[in-house]
Image (cartoon, grey):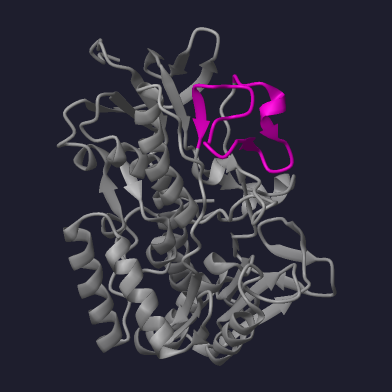
Amino acid sequence: MNIPESNVPRVVIIGGGFAGVNLAKSLANKNLQVVLLDKHNYHTFQPLLYQVSSSGLEPDSIAYPLRKIIKKHKNSFFRLANVEQINTEGKEVLTSIGKLNYDYLVIATGTKTNYFGSKSIEANSMPMKSVPQALNIRSLILQNFEKAAIANSDAARNAYLNFVIVGAGPTGVELAGAIAELKNHVLPREYHDLNSNHMQIHLLEGADRVLPPMSKHASKKAKAFLKSLGVNVHTNVFVKDYDGKVVTTNSDLVLHTETLIWAAGVTGAPINGLKAESMKTNTNRYLVNRFNQIEGYDTIFAIGDIAYMSTENYPNAHPQVAQPAIQQGKLLGKNLVRFAKNQPPKPFAYHDKGSMATIGRNKAVVDLKHFKFGGFFAWFIWMFIHLMSLVGFRNRVIVFFNWTYNYINFDKAARLIIRPFKK
């Protein structure tokens, strides 16, 4: 890998998501060598992936080069690689570009889409966990519009204009709202040969309400916002199968569609090599203590979505969202410096800053500790926080101007089929 030998301990970080990036930043110019490994050369701001999918933003607005993040860190290195296995006895990581020894290993691989064992759904649905997947959805949506315009039958046309989203968590709700805005503002103006009323958006949720992780107040508001946009909301509905044409459910609901977007859940993305008893098997997350050490190991850590830390306030572990990952990354950076100096580490305590979701123009919901509200003010707060959370000044400027343009013109400026998608 051409990583220089060093007389200071080496920290290897697997994963350049929120957890890995914040850990790498917290170790900047400390008395440690840091090696960051990832299969992509960029960090993705995942909360805005849905806007890439729905033509609101270009991918370079929400992605940032990992090398640029650590460019001023004198003893930090990045390598583009797939990590294949961990040799715990030899304290080395086996990757697609070679082996690398470590003194401290941090796994921050996050999650992958959970299809709950359905091979047909996995083969035929559209996941949205990465920039390439978001671009696939964008291309498919726009291609469906074009195919609908030349369809020879009403049934074929309706199938192209029927969009089914499974999972009404923040991702599903936000994506449903964004696609509804395409229907309400873009289709009537630019697809004159299509009747926008034929376009249907169905949001399916297995729980009894949308946004199950948030408050009932937020769920009620979000559902009302979705319905005002023309989204068909179906709760207590589970998808049983999807063959690429027809969605069957646990109810009488049967949907004919060319597009099923799967946002129904995630599972951990572990790496081969650790003991089976170190894993929470039903979630594929590593069991960690309050210092993020993986059970059974002193020098191997897990942070972010892949870490399962059970505490008094969070007996079923912390939510798999950005804030726990960011906070764990920052604290572990400080603790690794303490470990290297043989000083006692500090335990992790999660500070819940609240949760939020946007449903569309002037429509959002916010849950804070003592306040719960929705509407324009919530939407403004959502925009400000997400804008300021983006990595890099350039990305903030581009996103701000895109949002301003979209707001003034009721348009989605990134409606380009750059890379056609084929099932």
Q: Residue at x 56, y 53 (%)?
A: 320
Residue 186 left/right relative to 259: left
> Which x, y percent locates residue 344?
45, 30
The total of numbered circles placed on residues is: 0
> Which x, y percent locates residue 28?
24, 35
Vertical order, 97 against 409 (above or below)? above
Q: What is the span of residues highlighted in magenta in the rendered image?
A: 273-302
Residue 187 visible here: no
Q: Is residue 282 magenta?
A: yes
Residue 12 visible here: yes
Vertical order, 126 against 41 (above or below)? below
Residue 9 left/right relative to 157: left
Q: Quadrant of residue 187 in the image?
A: bottom left
Q: From the viewer's side, name the closer residue of 85 and 120.
A: 85
Vertical order, 325 against 240 (above or below)? above
Q: Residue at x 49, y 37 (%)?
A: 109
> Which x, y percent locates residue 150?
48, 74
Residue 189 left/right relative to 302: left
Q: From the viewer's side, name the closer residue of 375 and 302.
A: 302
Q: Residue at x 57, y 83 (%)?
A: 222
Q: Quadrant of residue 170 in the image?
A: bottom right
Q: Residue furthest bottom?
A: 228
> Which x, y percent locates residue 289?
60, 36
Residue 238 left/right relative to 202: right
Q: Main secondary structure of the magenta part?
A: loop
Q: From the viewer's side, name the closer residue of 107 and 397.
A: 107
Q: Is residue 151 magenta?
A: no
Q: Residue furthest top?
A: 90
Q: From the viewer's side, name the closer residue of 261 and 404.
A: 404
Quadrant location, the N terminus: top left
Vertical order, 174 against 38 (above or below)? below
Q: Residue at x 54, y 88 (%)?
A: 225
